[in-house]
Image (spheres, rainbow, N blue to C red):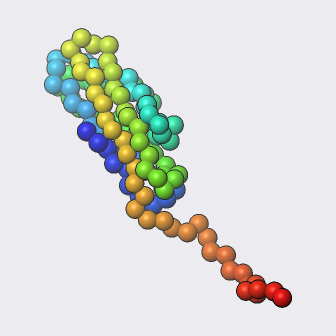
Amino acid sequence: NTIEFTGALHATVIKQVRLKNPSKKALIYNAILIGRDAGDFSLPKGNTVTIAPKRQASMNVEFTIRFLRPAEAVLLLTSSGIDSATLTFSLKSEVKHIEPAGILKCKSPCYEL
């Protein structure tokens, strides 16, 4: 699964990952961000999520677009439970537009002799 973070340069984008627990036991997942640009992504509500039996929970992933090049990382969710699967999500970014931080007007001659 791929989660795409699209927006303007320097914008902060938050995506929710919804996790479902079909089992009769509570699941506890620990999240780890790995990869080239993992430091640019964050988990603002912490890196642990508990999912009650037969329920669902969500985890927020936050990213601030700092560069024009696409950022890539992997969200890895692991659990110590025997019945739970390790989940992976590919995180990718794309700059859709650039807004100027400000406008500076100046006058100068095109050339000097």
Q: Residue furthest top?
A: 82
| For residue 40, above or below residue 96 | above
Out of 63 and 112, give the one closest to the viewer. 112
Residue at (43%, 50%) from the top-left corner?
Answer: 70
Q: Position of residue 5 (x, y in %)?
A: 38, 50
| For residue 11, above or below residue 98 | above
Q: Residue furthest front?
A: 113
The answer to whether residue 44 of the structure is visible from this angle is: no
Residue 58 occupies quadrant = top left
Residue at (43%, 65%) from the top-left corner?
Answer: 97
How many tags in the picture?
0
Residue 111 occupies quadrant = bottom right
The answer to whether residue 17 of the structure is visible from this angle is: yes
Q: Position of residue 80 (x, y in %)?
A: 32, 13
Task: Please identify the quadrant where the N terminus is shown.
Answer: top left
Q: Position of residue 8 (x, y in %)?
A: 45, 60
| For residue 24, above or below residue 39 | above
Q: Report the side of 101 relative to 6 (left or right).
A: right
Residue at (40%, 62%) from the top-left corner?
Answer: 96
Out of 59 and 102, give the one closest to the viewer. 102
Q: Position of residue 53 (x, y in %)?
A: 20, 22
| For residue 94, above or below residue 41 | below
Task: Please identify the quadrant where the C terminus is shown.
Answer: bottom right
Residue at (33%, 38%) from the top-left corner?
Answer: 90
Out of 13 and 72, give the one closest to the viewer. 72
